[in-house]
Amino acid sequence: MRYVVTGAAGFVGSHLSDALLAGGDEVVAVDCLTDYYDPAEKEENALGLDLVRLDLADADLDLDGVDGVFHLAGQPGVRSFGDAFPLYVRRNVIATQRVLESASRAGVRVVFASSSSIYGNAERYPTPEDARPQPISPYGITKLACEHLVRAYGVDAVTLRYFTVYGPRQRPDMLFRRVCDALRDGTTFEVYGSGAQSRSFTEVGDAVAATIAAMKEAPAGALYNVGGGDEASVVEAIALLERVSGRSLDVRRVDPARGDVARTKADVTRIRDELGWSPRVPLADGLPRMWSWASARVAAR
Ligand SMILES: NC(=O)c1ccc[n+]([C@@H]2O[C@H](COP(=O)([O-])OP(=O)(O)OC[C@H]3O[C@@H](n4cnc5c(N)ncnc54)[C@H](O)[C@@H]3O)[C@@H](O)[C@H]2O)c1
């Protein structure tokens, strides 16, 4: 099969593209290498891909001969208040609307990467897909708007709500990556608030497996949580990485970050029942892989 992967030079999109190629599929890898973090990292992620540089907020996708679109391009990160907001609107809402226009004309399936951020401080834990969306970050609000667009366009689409994905190539603004970098470089790590906030951490290989299953097996219109089985607080995650790395982290507490939810905990019953997917990689296996990638980056410099 021939698939477009948008955001193919990003963290999750590059792993997805590699997995599709390894499974014998063809990949049209689309990304415009935004400068949200160092584009050189994205170029590294995309080594081995034939990258089509396209800004989806102002260009159409050519879907001739394409069997499906994995739409992962977007502006992530919950620190989306203030001047950053127009970028979130452009790279999430406007880009997604254009992708949906193209998909609807071509009649191809879209798998859309949404986020657990749409739940905000969720009504209940573990959180099932029918919990009321109540995002507390502008980022989460743009992702929820994209979900509504997917529904409004009525295209053959599957929406995935990823819960904090981690692993090699993780974005430099994300928790595990920031902890690994600080452990590696011996720099001070800032914990927002008490550090008691916790997440359902999802290993990237697990997230990719769910994403491919969504394209190939899910019924049209499906909506799934994609969340890891292990929940850990920021403090617990730091302790785990200290153990894995054999180093200790210099921690400084700073004010809680606006838009940061207190907890995420995915209920993955629906995707398990319908697609047979459940998270396989526990933190105890995923974190050593993450650390060896992050520490090897130093050697490569
Ligand atoms: N990583 C997570 O834990 C997580 C959790 C929930 C949802 N998501 C969503 O999954 C997707 C992938 O996340 P990620 O962590 O890999 O992020 P990422 O920033 O590493 O990747 C996104 C990629 O999209 C590209 N992009 C942005 N706007 C674009 C545009 N207008 N045209 C073309 N390319 C554009 C960027 O250059 C980047 O390479 C995002 O949509 C994100 O919101 C990620």
Image (cartoon, helix red, strand yellow):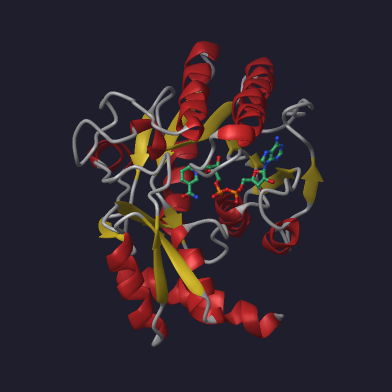
Identify which residue, 37 or 52, lies in the foreground. 37
- Residue 68 visible here: no
Q: Where 237 sits versus 144, above or below?
A: below
**Quarter of the image where one finds residue 31:** top right
Give the quarter the ligand 1 occupies. top right
**Left or right of 104: which side holds 283?**
left
Q: Residue 186: image x %, image y %?
A: 52, 81
- Residue displayed at 34% across by 42% down: 261
Q: Where 110 sits versus 115, above or below?
A: above
**Left or right of 125: which side holds 135?**
right
**Left or right of 135: which side holds 270?**
left
- Residue displayed at 43% across by 41% down: 258
Q: Residue 128: image x %, image y %?
A: 24, 34
Q: Where 204 sits versus 73, above or below?
A: below
- Residue displayed at 34% across by 64% down: 281
- Residue 127 visible here: yes
- Residue displayed at 63% across by 77% down: 297
Identify which residue, 65 or 268, lies in the foreground. 268
Which residue is outermost to the bottom?
A: 246
Identify which residue, 137 or 117, lies in the foreground. 137
**Left or right of 159: which side holds 62?**
right
Number of numbered discs: 0
Q: Residue 224: image x %, image y %?
A: 36, 35
Q: Where 122 sits versus 297, above or below?
A: above
Q: Residue 269: image x %, image y %?
A: 23, 40
Location of the N terminus (image quadrant): top right
Location of the C terminus (image quadrant): bottom right
